[in-house]
Amino acid sequence: MAKNRLRNAAVKIGSAVGRADGTAHKAAHKAARAAQVAKEELNELSKQVDALKKQLKKSAKQLQSALK
């Protein structure tokens, strides 16, 4: 009877550990995906900022030549 109790306790502990591991794995996967999306968005914003800098430089040149 004691063996059954120990075995049942071990099964419950193993099941809980397995569930916790699965949950941790899913959370890590979601975090990695969120980081990837953030990186892609940052790259896109960097491209937009570079385009705006280029446009601003061009506009400044045009304004300077118009003021001459």
Image: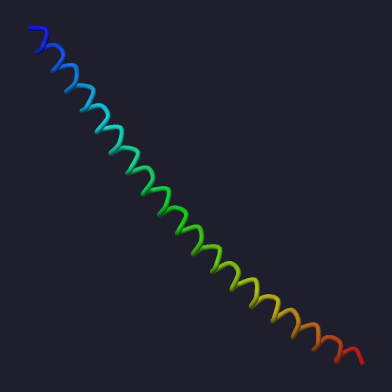
Find the residue positioned furthest to the left. 1
The residue at 44%/52% (across/down) is: 34
The residue at 28%/39% (across/down) is: 22
Whole-percent x, y for residue 37 in the image: 45, 59
> Is 35 left or right of 66, judged from the image as shown?
left
All told, the count of numbered labels is 0
Q: Quadrant of the N terminus?
A: top left
Find the residue positioned furthest to the right. 68
- Res 25 → quadrant: top left
Whole-percent x, y for residue 52 in the image: 67, 75
Colouring method of the image: rainbow
Viewer-proximal residue, 48 or 31? 31
| 47 lies above or below 38 | below
| 53 lies above or below 63 | above
Q: Quadrant of the C terminus?
A: bottom right
The residue at 86%/87% (across/down) is: 64
Viewer-proximal residue, 27 or 56? 27
- Res 65 → quadrant: bottom right
| 53 lies above or below 21 | below
Viewer-proximal residue, 30 or 1? 1
> Is 50 left or right of 1, judged from the image as shown?
right
> Is 45 left or right of 66, judged from the image as shown?
left
Find the residue positioned furthest to the front. 3
| 42 lies above or below 19 | below
- Res 17 → quadrant: top left
Whole-percent x, y for residue 6 in the image: 16, 14
